[in-house]
Image: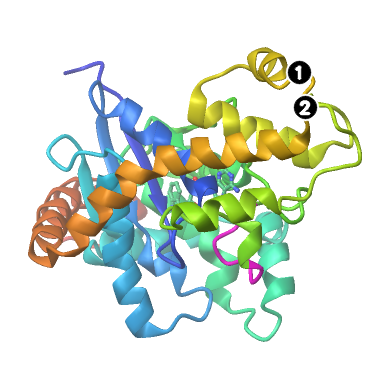
Amino acid sequence: MEDKKIIFSGVQPSGILTIGNYLGALINWAKFQDENNCIFCVVDQHAITIKQVPAELRRRTYETLAIYIACGIDPEKCTLFVQSHVPAHAELAWILNCSTMFGELSRMTQFKDKSKRHHDNINAGLFTYPVLMAADILLYQTDLVPVGQDQQQHIELARDVAARFNQSYSETFKIPVGFIPKTGARVMSLQDPLKKMSKSDENVNGFVSLLDDKDTIMRKFRRAVTDSDTCVRRGEGKDGINNLMSIYSCFTGKTDEETEKEFDGRGYGEFKEAVGIACAEGLAPIQEKFKELMNDKAYLEGVMRKGAEEANRMARKTLSKVYRKVGFVGL
Ligand code: TYM
């Protein structure tokens, strides 16, 4: 019991999850659940930093939770909940805002990217988003945060803010560590392999959604941008092939050497076909389970309710400690 680690992570319900989310994050979450205390959150409060259609946000919140479970995350072993069901996240975020510097937030690359893409809606929430993320993590005295590469900077910030708070008010938060996988930490767009694969990409051929059917998956991989070489081998300037090799490795467990040998003397066409098949086969059981779960809203709501209760209990403990430390009057 004592040496069980606390694992926390989350995904925004801002679109159907992609194989980037799956290979960078979710696939690893399930691996932690037997030996640790795992807490996984659908971060709906984060999602509204970008304009959302309310009915779609609501539907995607159910879908994201269903995808967690369909990916093998067991609600009996883990705490699965929706962020807005646990008010302590927003409450702690306010306190941490007062321990986070404007300059630190200005350096966040995701803020810079998103404010370029959504220049008509550069709201304060988008700017302070990493503070809410720090609150998510720190509320649970988290040891380990399994995420993709793009979240590393946010985790660094959470660590800095926690250390600063501890220094000002005495030891309060555990300093969390990020867990970023060796392969799959940064799945790139199939159309522009210098750009991260994203569920909000307006070019649907750039990403493979976890719910794409086999034909769509095959078509997207066939169209994947590669280079003028013909040899299936990693290399500088071969970003498209490097990306496909990583995806292939994640779905098949094969090393790069094994893949190079397997496709020795065969062209890119055959390789793309094989990556498509491996991906479609990997996703088929997830899709089947997902459909089943989406037909049972009552079950999903039961999971949300149980998760919210557990998360509220844990989060309140940390929040009341924080309130005491900063000098708020308790009644
Ligand atoms: P989000 O919703 O953008 O992505 C969810 C998870 O998927 C990973 N990911 C990727 N990994 C590899 N390749 C990609 N192309 C790719 N795209 C996304 C992300 O790194 C992430 O792990 N801020 C977070 C959500 C969040 C959170 C948290 C995470 C809120 N609070 C607390 C951990 C702990 C986000 O926007 O992830």
Which residue is label 2 attached to? 232
Residue 44: x %, y % from top left: 37, 67
Residue 193 position (above or below residue 126): above
Residue type marked 1? Asp
The residue drawn where x is 70% and y is 13% is 261
Q: What residue range appears in magenta?
A: 197-203
Query: Which structural element holds mark 2?
Result: loop
The residue drawn where x is 15% and y is 59% is 300
Q: Residue 182 occupies which quadrant of the picture?
A: top right
Question: Quick one: 17 or 141, which is closer to the camera?
Answer: 17
Residue 51 position (above or below residue 281): below
Question: Quick one: 247 or 176, which is closer to the camera?
Answer: 247
Residue 11: x %, y % from top left: 42, 54
The residue drawn where x is 72% and y is 18% is 260
User: Relative to residue 10, is residue 203 drawn left or right?
Assistant: right
Residue 291: x %, y % from top left: 24, 58
Residue 1 position (above or below residue 238): above
Which residue is label 1 attached to? 264
Q: Which coloring applies here?
A: rainbow
